[in-house]
């Protein structure tokens, strides 16, 4: 099993590149705090190199910058290459399969006393659409026993009915 979940801050702006077949790929490094502190009480961190592909790479470049807090899920992958000195270099990096933008970069027109806008992942729109479809189904199927009926806004519960 090779699954890694991290939450950390980007140490610099993501670097967006395109492969020879025009596939976008972004690379960045996450600073992930350790759960314990050092001998002098200072917070230690690990610096994890990450890559992400496709549309997600473009979104990372668009919405994130140095200091952005993100959550990533992916797999560790090792690779090696020969550097310009002819030495073999081994790399261990996290290949991100998903990313959550917990804090995004500020727009140029925002002042410093405003927080950065959160990226919308469409949950609200998806929920509203499902609610609309359910209401339409309920209206068209009034005899369906599984359609929730309107039970009113208040419940008559005696304090003796409560388990606490």
Image: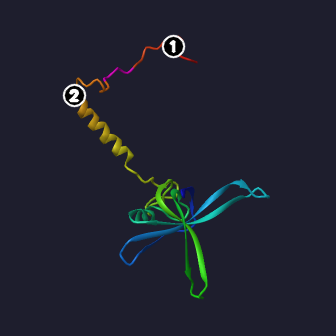
Which of pointers 1 and 2 lies earlier in the amino acid sequence?
2
Viewer-nearest of discs 1 and 2: 2
1 or 81, which lies in front? 1
**Tag 1, which secondary structure?**
helix
Indicate whether 60 appears above or below 121.
below
**Tags 1 and 2 touching, CB below 8 Å:** no
Within 10 Å of disc 1 (Cα), the crowding (few <14, some 14-19, many 20+) is few
97 or 39, which lies in front? 97
Q: Residue at x 74, y 58 (%)?
A: 42
- Most distant residue in the right direction: 39
Residue 14 at least partly seen: no
Magenta includes 59? Answer: no
- Asked where in the image residue 150 lies, by quadrant, the reply is top left
Quadrant (top left/top right/bottom left/bottom right) for the N terminus: bottom right
Quadrant (top left/top right/bottom left/bottom right) for the C terminus: top right
Q: Which residue is mark 1?
A: 161
* Image side of residue 137 versus residue 160, left or right: left
Point out the stretch of residues depicted in magenta: 149-153
Indicate whether 74 appears above or below 160.
below
Q: Which residue is mark 2?
A: 141
């Amino acid at each position: 099993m090779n699954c890694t979940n991290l939450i950390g801050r980007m140490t610099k702006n993501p670097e967006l590149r395109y492969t020879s077949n025009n596939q976008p790929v972004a690379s960045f490094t996450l600073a992930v705090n350790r759960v314990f502190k050092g001998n002098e009480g200072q917070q230690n961190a690990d610096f994890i190199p990450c890559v992400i592909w496709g549309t997600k790479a473009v979104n990372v470049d668009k919405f994130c910058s140095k200091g952005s807090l993100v959550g990533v899920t992916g797999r560790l992958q090792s690779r090696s290459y020969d550097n310009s000195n002819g030495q073999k270099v081994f790399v261990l990096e996290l290949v991100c399969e998903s990313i959550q933008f917990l804090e995004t970069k500020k727009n140029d027109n925002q002042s410093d006393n405003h927080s950065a806008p959160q990226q919308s992942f469409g949950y609200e729109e998806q929920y509203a659409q499902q609610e609309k479809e359910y209401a339409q189904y309920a209206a068209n199927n009034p005899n369906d026993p599984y359609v929730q009926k309107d039970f009113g806004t208040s419940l008559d519960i005696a304090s003796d009915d409560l388990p606490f």
